[in-house]
Image (spheres, rainbow, N blue to C red):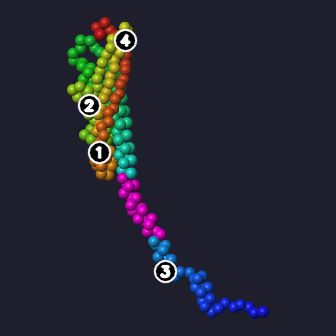
Amino acid sequence: MTTCAPRPEQRSRIPAQRKRPPLRRRRHARSERGSTSALELMALTPVCALAVAFITWAGNTGQAQLAVTLAAQEAATAAAVCCGSPRPHDAAYDQNTARQLTAEAVIAARPSLERLCTGGPRPVGPHGQWIAYTTEPADELRIAVVTAHIVCTTDGAATPVRGLFGTRTVHGHGTHITTAPTTKGTP
């Protein structure tokens, strides 16, 4: 019996097929794999920064809306309870002026409005009044309705680039209803 020995040309081919590629090629291939991720990250960074700026703008706009609404509610409540019952035939005591000044003081005491509102909060009522005061006579009680309306223009003050997303006007409304006993001299 004879054994088959591989031919000399076959011996040289078999190890050549099993050889690994040179080490240089492997290192080069690894660095190329990482460069794709770096390029994607570089392209994605401005998009992420813009998304963060938009979220900040939206949050500040929402905060301005809440601050203006709360200030209007507080101003209406303060103006309703500040002056008590009317004093008939007392020309020196002007309740409407006292209510306006009280509402203005309450609104001015909110520092967040100055920060969030471009140019500060503004009154909307007729003749630049912060509140509107109306009364309705009833049988035994006088019903008074005090309404405050405030306007604020905001631009998302904390955004890195002012004016990037534009401005938004927010309105705050607050109403307080109170009753007082009627007297013979008061309608």
Could you tell me the amino acid type at mark 1?
Gly
SS category of the residue bearing label 3: helix
Residue that label 3 marks: 24
x, y (%) of residue 47? Answer: 38, 55
Task: Compute the Cα span from label 4 to label 3.
Answer: 96 Å
Residue that label 4 marks: 141
Whether residue 49 is situated above or below residue 141 in the rendered picture: below
For the point 29% across and 25% down, the residue is: 131
For the point 27% across and 41% down, the residue is: 118
Mark 2 burial class by Cα count in 10 Å: few <14, some 14-19, many 20+? some
Whether residue 23 is situated above or below residue 5 in the rendered picture: above
Task: Compute the Cα span from label 4 to label 2.
Answer: 30 Å
Residue that label 1 marks: 166
Could you tell me the amino acid type at mark 2?
Pro
Residue at the right extreme? Answer: 1
Label of residue 177 in the image = none
Task: Compute the Cα span from label 2 to label 3.
Answer: 74 Å
From where the camera sits, is residue 109 visible? Answer: no
Q: Earlier in the sequence, mark 4 or mark 3?
A: 3
What range is drawn magenta here? 33-50
Mark in front: 4 vs 3: 3
Q: Exactly how many numbered labels are in the figure? A: 4
Could you tell me the amino acid type at mark 3?
Arg
Q: Earlier in the sequence, mark 4 or mark 2?
A: 2
Q: Earlier in the sequence, mark 4 or mark 1?
A: 4
Label of residue 123 in the image = 2
Is 34 in the magenta? yes
